[in-house]
Image (cartoon, helix red, strand yellow):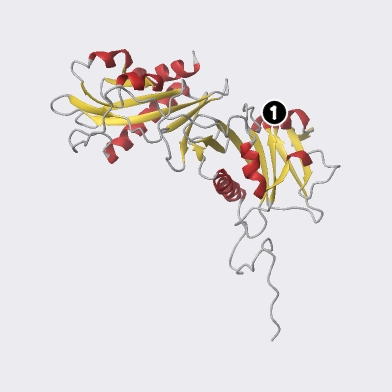
Amino acid sequence: MALRQPLSPLDPPLRPPWRSELSTPQFGPMCEDLLAVSLMAAAGGLATIGRPMVDRGVDLYMRRLRSLLTVPIQVKGFTHADPDATVSEDLLVSDVHEAPGGYLAFVHAPLPYDQLYRRLFLIPIATFRERCPVITAAGKRAFHFVANLAGGTTDPWSEFLMDIDQLPEWLAAIPGWMRPVPPAPSSEGDAILELTESSSHDNLAEAHLGRLWATSAIARAGLDRVVIVEDRVRLDTVTLLLHDLPSGQVAGLHIRTAAYPEDRRIHFDVKRRGFFIDPKLYILLVLLDKERKAGDFCLLIPSEAMPELGYSETLTLDPLTKRFRPYQVPAEQLGRTLLTNLFGA
Protein backbone atom coordinates (compact mmCIF):
# COMPACT_ATOMS: atom_id res chain seq x y z
CA MET A 1 0.00 0.00 0.00
CA ALA A 2 1.34 3.39 -0.98
CA LEU A 3 2.08 5.75 1.87
CA ARG A 4 -0.12 8.83 2.02
CA GLN A 5 1.80 12.05 1.65
CA PRO A 6 1.54 14.27 4.74
CA LEU A 7 -0.66 17.32 4.34
CA SER A 8 0.68 20.85 4.61
CA PRO A 9 -0.06 22.36 8.04
CA LEU A 10 -2.37 24.83 6.31
CA ASP A 11 -4.28 22.23 4.31
CA PRO A 12 -7.63 21.60 6.01
CA PRO A 13 -8.18 18.05 7.28
CA LEU A 14 -11.12 16.03 6.03
CA ARG A 15 -14.45 17.18 7.44
CA PRO A 16 -17.09 14.68 8.59
CA PRO A 17 -20.15 14.89 6.29
CA TRP A 18 -22.45 15.82 9.20
CA ARG A 19 -20.59 19.06 9.95
CA SER A 20 -22.31 22.21 8.74
CA GLU A 21 -20.84 25.58 7.81
CA LEU A 22 -20.28 28.20 10.47
CA SER A 23 -22.51 31.25 10.59
CA THR A 24 -21.01 34.75 10.56
CA PRO A 25 -21.85 35.35 14.26
CA GLN A 26 -19.86 32.20 15.11
CA PHE A 27 -16.93 32.87 12.79
CA GLY A 28 -16.15 36.39 14.01
CA PRO A 29 -15.57 35.49 17.70
CA MET A 30 -13.50 32.47 16.64
CA CYS A 31 -11.16 34.75 14.68
CA GLU A 32 -10.92 37.05 17.70
CA ASP A 33 -10.03 34.12 19.95
CA LEU A 34 -7.40 32.80 17.55
CA LEU A 35 -5.78 36.22 17.24
CA ALA A 36 -5.90 36.73 21.02
CA VAL A 37 -4.04 33.44 21.54
CA SER A 38 -1.41 34.45 18.97
CA LEU A 39 -0.89 37.86 20.60
CA MET A 40 -0.62 36.42 24.11
CA ALA A 41 1.93 33.87 22.92
CA ALA A 42 3.89 36.55 21.06
CA ALA A 43 3.99 38.80 24.14
CA GLY A 44 5.85 36.16 26.12
CA GLY A 45 4.10 36.87 29.42
CA LEU A 46 4.19 40.68 29.15
CA ALA A 47 0.57 41.22 28.04
CA THR A 48 -3.00 40.46 28.90
CA ILE A 49 -6.03 40.45 26.62
CA GLY A 50 -9.33 42.01 27.67
CA ARG A 51 -12.77 41.85 26.10
CA PRO A 52 -15.46 44.53 26.26
CA MET A 53 -18.63 43.70 28.15
CA VAL A 54 -20.55 45.54 25.41
CA ASP A 55 -19.12 45.67 21.87
CA ARG A 56 -18.75 49.28 20.77
CA GLY A 57 -16.35 48.72 17.90
CA VAL A 58 -13.28 47.26 19.63
CA ASP A 59 -13.02 43.48 19.93
CA LEU A 60 -9.79 43.05 21.91
CA TYR A 61 -7.85 45.24 24.32
CA MET A 62 -4.20 44.19 24.51
CA ARG A 63 -2.53 45.70 27.59
CA ARG A 64 1.06 45.70 28.81
CA LEU A 65 1.02 44.10 32.24
CA ARG A 66 1.46 46.39 35.26
CA SER A 67 0.66 49.43 33.16
CA LEU A 68 -2.26 51.04 31.36
CA LEU A 69 -0.49 50.96 27.98
CA THR A 70 -3.34 49.53 25.91
CA VAL A 71 -3.77 48.74 22.21
CA PRO A 72 -7.40 48.50 21.03
CA ILE A 73 -7.87 46.00 18.18
CA GLN A 74 -10.85 45.57 15.88
CA VAL A 75 -10.79 42.13 14.22
CA LYS A 76 -12.14 41.27 10.77
CA GLY A 77 -11.94 37.69 9.52
CA PHE A 78 -12.04 36.24 6.01
CA THR A 79 -13.40 32.77 5.37
CA HIS A 80 -12.44 32.95 1.69
CA ALA A 81 -9.38 33.98 -0.29
CA ASP A 82 -9.17 33.97 -4.10
CA PRO A 83 -6.72 31.54 -5.78
CA ASP A 84 -4.25 34.43 -6.12
CA ALA A 85 -4.57 35.13 -2.34
CA THR A 86 -6.74 38.25 -2.75
CA VAL A 87 -9.17 39.05 0.04
CA SER A 88 -11.84 41.74 0.13
CA GLU A 89 -14.28 43.18 2.63
CA ASP A 90 -16.75 46.07 2.74
CA LEU A 91 -16.91 47.69 6.18
CA LEU A 92 -19.54 50.26 7.04
CA VAL A 93 -17.88 53.58 7.80
CA SER A 94 -20.01 53.82 10.94
CA ASP A 95 -18.59 50.48 12.15
CA VAL A 96 -14.93 51.53 12.00
CA HIS A 97 -14.61 53.67 15.11
CA GLU A 98 -11.76 56.03 15.78
CA ALA A 99 -9.53 54.67 18.54
CA PRO A 100 -6.23 56.45 19.23
CA GLY A 101 -3.43 53.91 19.03
CA GLY A 102 -5.86 51.27 17.77
CA TYR A 103 -5.48 48.75 14.96
CA LEU A 104 -7.63 46.92 12.47
CA ALA A 105 -6.59 43.28 12.22
CA PHE A 106 -7.56 41.45 9.03
CA VAL A 107 -7.08 37.70 9.42
CA HIS A 108 -7.86 34.70 7.26
CA ALA A 109 -9.14 31.47 8.81
CA PRO A 110 -9.46 28.77 6.15
CA LEU A 111 -11.42 25.57 6.59
CA PRO A 112 -11.88 24.05 9.13
CA TYR A 113 -11.54 27.48 10.85
CA ASP A 114 -9.43 26.23 13.75
CA GLN A 115 -6.23 28.16 12.94
CA LEU A 116 -5.28 31.43 11.32
CA TYR A 117 -3.47 31.61 8.03
CA ARG A 118 0.18 32.46 8.66
CA ARG A 119 -0.17 36.02 7.37
CA LEU A 120 -2.36 38.88 8.59
CA PHE A 121 -2.76 42.63 8.22
CA LEU A 122 -2.37 44.96 11.20
CA ILE A 123 -3.32 48.47 10.09
CA PRO A 124 -3.53 51.55 12.32
CA ILE A 125 -7.19 52.59 12.39
CA ALA A 126 -6.30 56.22 11.64
CA THR A 127 -4.32 55.14 8.56
CA PHE A 128 -7.10 52.83 7.39
CA ARG A 129 -9.73 55.57 7.63
CA GLU A 130 -7.48 57.93 5.70
CA ARG A 131 -6.40 55.59 2.89
CA CYS A 132 -9.18 53.08 2.29
CA PRO A 133 -11.54 53.89 -0.62
CA VAL A 134 -15.16 54.57 0.33
CA ILE A 135 -18.02 53.21 -1.76
CA THR A 136 -21.79 53.10 -1.45
CA ALA A 137 -23.06 49.62 -0.61
CA ALA A 138 -26.80 49.00 -0.12
CA GLY A 139 -27.28 52.73 0.23
CA LYS A 140 -24.67 53.10 2.97
CA ARG A 141 -21.11 54.41 2.93
CA ALA A 142 -18.56 51.64 3.33
CA PHE A 143 -14.81 51.19 3.24
CA HIS A 144 -13.85 48.88 0.35
CA PHE A 145 -10.81 46.91 1.50
CA VAL A 146 -9.00 44.78 -1.09
CA ALA A 147 -5.57 43.30 -0.37
CA ASN A 148 -3.38 40.32 -1.15
CA LEU A 149 -2.10 37.89 1.46
CA ALA A 150 0.91 37.16 -0.76
CA GLY A 151 1.97 40.81 -0.62
CA GLY A 152 3.75 42.46 -3.50
CA THR A 153 4.87 45.96 -4.38
CA THR A 154 1.60 46.79 -6.11
CA ASP A 155 -0.54 46.05 -3.07
CA PRO A 156 -1.25 49.35 -1.24
CA TRP A 157 -1.53 47.50 2.09
CA SER A 158 1.64 45.37 1.83
CA GLU A 159 3.53 47.44 4.42
CA PHE A 160 1.02 46.24 7.04
CA LEU A 161 1.22 42.56 6.05
CA MET A 162 3.20 40.29 8.36
CA ASP A 163 3.69 36.68 9.33
CA ILE A 164 2.29 35.61 12.67
CA ASP A 165 5.88 34.76 13.63
CA GLN A 166 6.66 38.49 13.38
CA LEU A 167 4.17 39.50 16.07
CA PRO A 168 6.85 39.68 18.80
CA GLU A 169 8.75 42.28 16.75
CA TRP A 170 5.50 44.18 16.09
CA LEU A 171 4.75 44.29 19.80
CA ALA A 172 8.26 45.42 20.68
CA ALA A 173 7.92 48.35 18.26
CA ILE A 174 4.87 49.77 20.09
CA PRO A 175 6.09 52.95 21.85
CA GLY A 176 6.66 52.21 25.52
CA TRP A 177 6.00 48.47 25.26
CA MET A 178 9.52 47.41 26.23
CA ARG A 179 9.95 50.07 28.92
CA PRO A 180 10.60 48.39 32.29
CA VAL A 181 7.77 48.88 34.79
CA PRO A 182 9.08 50.15 38.14
CA PRO A 183 8.09 48.34 41.34
CA ALA A 184 5.38 49.85 43.50
CA PRO A 185 6.89 52.23 46.10
CA SER A 186 6.91 50.78 49.59
CA SER A 187 5.22 52.52 52.49
CA GLU A 188 6.66 53.16 55.92
CA GLY A 189 5.72 50.45 58.35
CA ASP A 190 4.26 48.32 55.54
CA ALA A 191 3.98 44.81 56.91
CA ILE A 192 2.88 41.45 55.61
CA LEU A 193 0.11 40.28 57.95
CA GLU A 194 -1.62 36.95 58.39
CA LEU A 195 -5.33 37.84 58.09
CA THR A 196 -7.98 35.74 59.78
CA GLU A 197 -11.04 34.77 57.78
CA SER A 198 -13.21 37.15 59.80
CA SER A 199 -10.95 40.19 59.39
CA SER A 200 -9.97 39.67 55.76
CA HIS A 201 -12.02 40.89 52.82
CA ASP A 202 -12.77 39.71 49.31
CA ASN A 203 -14.59 36.53 50.17
CA LEU A 204 -15.09 35.00 46.73
CA ALA A 205 -18.88 35.44 46.61
CA GLU A 206 -18.70 38.91 48.15
CA ALA A 207 -15.97 39.95 45.73
CA HIS A 208 -18.19 38.94 42.84
CA LEU A 209 -21.09 40.98 44.25
CA GLY A 210 -18.85 44.01 44.73
CA ARG A 211 -17.53 43.77 41.18
CA LEU A 212 -21.04 43.46 39.74
CA TRP A 213 -22.28 46.43 41.75
CA ALA A 214 -19.34 48.62 40.68
CA THR A 215 -19.74 47.58 37.04
CA SER A 216 -23.43 48.47 37.01
CA ALA A 217 -22.77 51.84 38.69
CA ILE A 218 -20.12 52.73 36.08
CA ALA A 219 -22.30 51.52 33.19
CA ARG A 220 -25.24 53.65 34.33
CA ALA A 221 -23.07 56.74 34.65
CA GLY A 222 -21.13 56.17 31.42
CA LEU A 223 -23.94 54.91 29.15
CA ASP A 224 -22.58 54.95 25.56
CA ARG A 225 -19.50 56.92 26.53
CA VAL A 226 -17.49 54.29 28.37
CA VAL A 227 -16.54 50.72 27.44
CA ILE A 228 -15.97 48.42 30.40
CA VAL A 229 -13.38 45.72 29.76
CA GLU A 230 -12.47 42.57 31.68
CA ASP A 231 -9.27 40.60 31.22
CA ARG A 232 -9.70 37.00 30.16
CA VAL A 233 -7.28 36.11 32.96
CA ARG A 234 -6.45 38.45 35.86
CA LEU A 235 -2.67 38.85 35.96
CA ASP A 236 -2.18 42.16 37.77
CA THR A 237 -4.02 44.73 39.86
CA VAL A 238 -6.49 45.88 37.18
CA THR A 239 -9.98 44.49 37.79
CA LEU A 240 -11.72 46.59 35.15
CA LEU A 241 -10.29 48.57 32.24
CA LEU A 242 -12.31 51.66 31.28
CA HIS A 243 -12.15 53.09 27.74
CA ASP A 244 -13.55 56.60 27.32
CA LEU A 245 -14.71 56.72 23.70
CA PRO A 246 -14.90 60.53 23.18
CA SER A 247 -11.33 61.12 24.37
CA GLY A 248 -9.80 57.72 23.63
CA GLN A 249 -8.33 57.62 27.15
CA VAL A 250 -7.93 54.36 29.04
CA ALA A 251 -8.06 54.00 32.83
CA GLY A 252 -8.03 51.16 35.34
CA LEU A 253 -9.94 50.22 38.48
CA HIS A 254 -8.86 47.80 41.19
CA ILE A 255 -11.86 46.57 43.21
CA ARG A 256 -11.82 45.26 46.77
CA THR A 257 -14.93 44.21 48.67
CA ALA A 258 -15.67 43.89 52.38
CA ALA A 259 -18.78 43.14 54.44
CA TYR A 260 -19.60 45.29 57.47
CA PRO A 261 -18.34 43.34 60.54
CA GLU A 262 -20.01 43.54 63.94
CA ASP A 263 -17.26 45.75 65.38
CA ARG A 264 -17.29 48.06 62.31
CA ARG A 265 -13.58 47.48 61.79
CA ILE A 266 -12.03 45.98 58.67
CA HIS A 267 -8.58 45.26 57.42
CA PHE A 268 -8.05 47.06 54.10
CA ASP A 269 -5.49 45.10 52.14
CA VAL A 270 -4.22 45.77 48.59
CA LYS A 271 -1.95 42.99 47.42
CA ARG A 272 1.45 44.25 46.35
CA ARG A 273 2.01 41.56 43.76
CA GLY A 274 1.09 42.96 40.36
CA PHE A 275 0.36 46.41 41.78
CA PHE A 276 1.50 49.55 39.99
CA ILE A 277 0.91 53.28 40.26
CA ASP A 278 -0.64 55.39 37.52
CA PRO A 279 -2.64 58.65 37.59
CA LYS A 280 -5.42 56.82 35.74
CA LEU A 281 -5.57 53.89 38.17
CA TYR A 282 -7.94 53.98 41.15
CA ILE A 283 -8.64 51.56 43.99
CA LEU A 284 -12.27 51.03 45.01
CA LEU A 285 -13.35 49.49 48.31
CA VAL A 286 -16.98 48.33 48.11
CA LEU A 287 -18.70 47.90 51.48
CA LEU A 288 -21.62 45.45 51.77
CA ASP A 289 -24.24 45.48 54.52
CA LYS A 290 -25.73 42.43 56.26
CA GLU A 291 -28.00 41.75 53.29
CA ARG A 292 -24.97 41.93 50.98
CA LYS A 293 -26.18 45.16 49.40
CA ALA A 294 -23.93 48.16 48.82
CA GLY A 295 -23.65 50.31 51.93
CA ASP A 296 -24.07 54.07 52.20
CA PHE A 297 -20.55 54.85 51.04
CA CYS A 298 -17.48 53.39 49.44
CA LEU A 299 -13.81 54.39 49.28
CA LEU A 300 -12.30 55.59 46.00
CA ILE A 301 -8.54 56.01 46.29
CA PRO A 302 -6.02 57.13 43.62
CA SER A 303 -3.23 54.56 43.26
CA GLU A 304 -0.76 57.40 43.86
CA ALA A 305 -2.05 57.70 47.44
CA MET A 306 -1.37 54.08 48.40
CA PRO A 307 2.27 54.45 49.53
CA GLU A 308 1.20 57.11 52.04
CA LEU A 309 -1.97 55.31 53.18
CA GLY A 310 -0.34 51.90 53.39
CA TYR A 311 -1.15 48.73 51.51
CA SER A 312 -2.27 46.78 54.57
CA GLU A 313 -4.17 48.81 57.15
CA THR A 314 -6.90 48.35 59.76
CA LEU A 315 -9.58 51.04 59.72
CA THR A 316 -12.85 51.79 61.48
CA LEU A 317 -16.01 52.51 59.50
CA ASP A 318 -18.12 54.34 62.09
CA PRO A 319 -16.60 56.86 62.37
CA LEU A 320 -14.35 56.36 59.34
CA THR A 321 -10.62 56.47 60.08
CA LYS A 322 -9.55 60.09 59.59
CA ARG A 323 -6.92 59.67 56.88
CA PHE A 324 -9.37 57.70 54.70
CA ARG A 325 -12.11 60.34 54.87
CA PRO A 326 -10.93 62.31 51.78
CA TYR A 327 -11.67 59.20 49.71
CA GLN A 328 -15.21 58.59 51.03
CA VAL A 329 -17.82 58.69 48.24
CA PRO A 330 -21.60 58.19 48.62
CA ALA A 331 -22.47 54.87 46.99
CA GLU A 332 -25.06 56.40 44.64
CA GLN A 333 -22.43 58.84 43.32
CA LEU A 334 -19.67 56.32 42.61
CA GLY A 335 -20.07 56.05 38.82
CA ARG A 336 -20.22 59.78 38.14
CA THR A 337 -17.43 60.59 40.62
CA LEU A 338 -15.09 57.98 39.17
CA LEU A 339 -15.65 59.01 35.55
CA THR A 340 -15.25 62.69 36.39
CA ASN A 341 -11.99 62.03 38.23
CA LEU A 342 -10.65 59.94 35.36
CA PHE A 343 -11.95 61.65 32.23
CA GLY A 344 -13.39 65.01 33.30
CA ALA A 345 -17.00 66.20 33.01
Answer yes or no: is residue 293 visible.
no
Q: Name the residue nearer the viewer: 322 or 217.
A: 322
- Which picture quadrant has residue 140? top right
For image coordinates 22% across by 16% down, the residue present is 321
Horizontal placement of 260 versus 331: left or right? left
- 100 in relation to 88, above or below: above
Q: Name the residue nearer the viewer: 275 or 78.
A: 275
Answer yes or no: is residue 203 visible.
yes
Q: Name the residue under label 1.
A: 126
**Where does the image place residue 314, in percent across and percent down from the top left?**
21, 25
- 13 in relation to 317, above or below: below
Q: Which residue lies furthest to the left in this view?
A: 263
Q: Residue furthest bottom?
A: 1
For image coordinates 75% across by 52% down, the residue present is 81
**Where does the image place residue 141, in percent across and percent down from the top left?**
74, 31
**Where does the image place residue 31, in percent across and percent down from the top left?**
60, 48
Q: Which amino acid does label 1 sit on?
A: Ala
For image coordinates 17% across by 35% down, the residue present is 198
Q: Name the residue nearer the viewer: 245 or 234.
A: 234
